[in-house]
Image (tube, grey):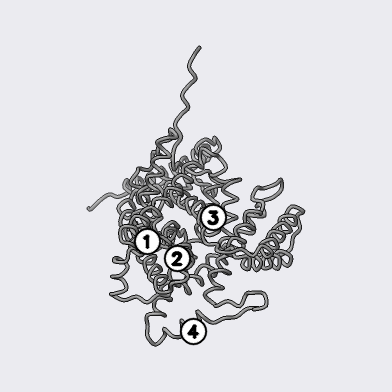
Amino acid sequence: MAASPTPPNRKVLGRLSLPERTFVADALRTETVGGVLLLLAAVTALVWVNVPALHDSYESLSHFHFGPSALGLDLSVAHWAADGLLAIFFFVAGIELKRELVAGDLRDPRTAALPVVAALCGMAVPALVYVLTSLSGGGSLTGWAVPTATDIAFALAVLAVIGTSLPSALRAFLLTLAVVDDLFAILIIAVFFTDSLDFAALGGAFVGLAVFWLLLRKGVRGWYIYVPLALLIWGLMYNSGIHATIAGVAMGLMLRCTRREGEEHSPGEHIEHLVRPVSAGLAVPLFALFSAGVAVSGSALGEVFTQPETLGVVLGLVVGKTIGIFGGTWLAARFTRASLSDDLSWPDVFAVSSLAGIGFTVSLLIGELAFEGDPVLSDSVKAAVLTGSLIAAVLATVLLKMRNAKYQALWAAEERDEDLDGIPDIYEQDDPAYHLRMAELYESKAAEHRRLAEVAGGAGDGDDGPA
């Protein structure tokens, strides 16, 4: 009996399909703008807090309470930003995750294995680094989850600032990592940061989610129905004791993200297109404005590297994230008979892994939850998140700049569209019509060159030179 043929090796981080490339480009364009706003918001918060004349106004605004107390929603501005506005961010994350599961890279278990393993290792190793660092210094283990999250918007802002032409496959890998990362961060928040439950409110939230799902199934349309229902679900979830952002991701996961006949976009894609700018341009920057405001001084920065909890956060982000994601990617490739794309090399994966060490939004949120009863340590951990993210950004900048000439060449090849049909040439190599168009184009150029040569030759023949 003849042996079955050995299946060909899969390529890791190979070229994206054209629809996937288009989706990734659109999503990352919005996240990049949001990342720049996030960066500006963080800098504004730091300046606001550290200028003595402005410090009190920041504290007063941050702790100003408003909202219906009868509904248990008399919250501070900072609290509204963390529990309310971030629910929009997690709603978009839920839609992204659903799309990846049903129409993106995660729908194929073989393709999904790489980013899932990389993301899991990219969360487990930072947590382990934090635990070992904190244990060795006699610190608290409460903050083990702080360095586990990646902030895709901040990472893309760094790419925008340094001007690196990262190939679309690496950008998609970073985006998928962040989506899986967000999923596990949500699970961590739900499981480890829920102290007590109000089962009546929780039951009401589940009933609201069931109604939300039924309305979607029936094809009911109208923002005036869904927005009040979403607010009700959010309020019930908040009062249940589970972090209210869970309501956002639950509703996002319920949206249909597959296209039916005659649809240009699925409902999930359409709603994500509408809500993503609100999330990236408003919700996340406002959260950063009221979360990144920590006092920074020489002694405070020095303490970041001397306290076991804060040192664990910095090392977790800078060292743990890089080693975890790079190691997870290598292991997934090694044990799934996959090989790296011919256009890339392992130093490219290492550079992107270091970029994933920028853990801002969700890391700040988990830091607030982990050290809620200790405001001094909570501020120190926030400073550690900022410091670790900054170091990771600088490290990634150096590594990516070293490879930038190669990335620019790859990016130019991906973008080249000589026949001007709106589709990059690299995606039309198997289309005979493309080659016919290119033959006509080259023939036209050749004819123009012959004409110019004849004109130049004629001018030369008519030149009799000096008498």
Q: From mark 4 to mark 2, how far is it between C-alphas?
A: 22 Å
N-terminal of the pair, mark 3 or mark 4, is: 4
Tell me the residue that label 3 is attached to. Answer: 187
Tell me the residue that label 4 is attached to. Answer: 60
* SS class, disc 1: helix
Mark 1 vs 4: CB contact within 8 A: no
Compared with 207, 7 (above or below) is above
Tell me the residue that label 1 is attached to. Answer: 313
Q: Residue lying at the far top in this picture: please name it.
A: 1
Mark 1 vs 3: CB contact within 8 A: no
Q: From mark 1 to mark 2, how far is it between C-alphas?
A: 10 Å
* SS class, disc 4: helix
- Residue 23 in the image: state x and y as whole percent: 55, 52
Residue at image coords 45%, 72%: 41
Compared with 75, 407 (above or below) is above
N-terminal of the pair, mark 4 or mark 2, is: 4
Q: Which mark is residue 367?
A: 2
- Residue 198 in the image: state x and y as whole percent: 64, 65
N-terminal of the pair, mark 2 or mark 3, is: 3
Query: Which amino acid, mark 3?
Result: Leu
Mark 1 vs 2: CB contact within 8 A: yes
Residue neighbourhood size for the residue with mark 3, other residues' Cα within 10 Å, grouped as few (<14), some (14–19), many (≥20): few
